[in-house]
Amino acid sequence: MPVCRFNLGVALLAVSVTAACDPQVLADKAMRRTAETVVRPVMARELPGNVAEAATQCVLDAASPEETRALARDVGVEAGTLTVQNIRNLATRPTATACFARNGVPPLKG
């Protein structure tokens, strides 16, 4: 019986490793990290360090994959007016505001 458990454990580990190597999963993670570099400076304009980081994660959690890709397009440049407005719109979604509350992030001004 222990041999079966071991084999099941090995099989589950193999499935986990395979899922971690899924190209779409890797692409989504890379896109999110790229979008973080766009959202974080916008959040940092109003919020201090760790709070801005938490707010960034909340905003990205509220974004759809398409919205995350749109945010990531501004990588390497300062976020423009439209991008800032999109980030603020994401920050007002119920998912984001609930995340803000859980993480001690105050509502954004104006």
Image (tube, rainbow, N blue to C red):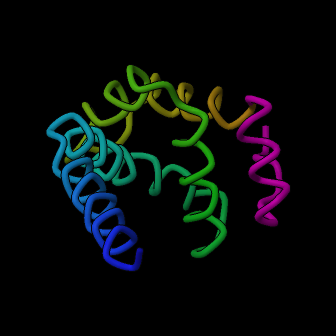
Kindly give the residue lying farthest to the bottom in the view shown. 2
How far across and down, in percent of the image, does residue 77 sit?
24, 43
Is residue 33 found left or right of 59 in the rendered image?
left
Determine whether 38 is above or below 92 in the image: below
Is residue 75 found left or right of 63 in the rendered image?
left
How far across and down, in percent of the image, does residue 38 sit?
37, 46
Q: Name which residue lies at 55% across and 65% down.
A: 53
Is residue 18 found left or right of 62 in the rendered image?
left
Q: Name which residue lies at 40% across and 26% down.
A: 65
Nearer the observer, 20 or 66: 20
Residues rendered magenta in the picture: 93-110
Q: Name which residue lies at 51% across and 34% down.
A: 84
Q: Quadrant of residue 22?
A: top left
Nearer the observer, 64 or 48: 64
Nearer the observer, 19 or 89: 19
* Residue 104 located within the stretch drawn in magenta: yes
How far across and down, in percent of the image, does residue 108 sit?
76, 46
Q: Quadrant of the N terminus?
A: bottom left
Q: Quadrant of residue 105?
A: bottom right
Kindly give the residue lying farthest to the front in the view shown. 1
* Residue 22 located within the stretch drawn in magenta: no
Q: Quadrant of residue 96?
A: top right
How many callouts does the rendering have?
0
How far across and down, in percent of the image, does residue 110 sit?
79, 37
Determine whether 72 is above or below 45 in the image: above
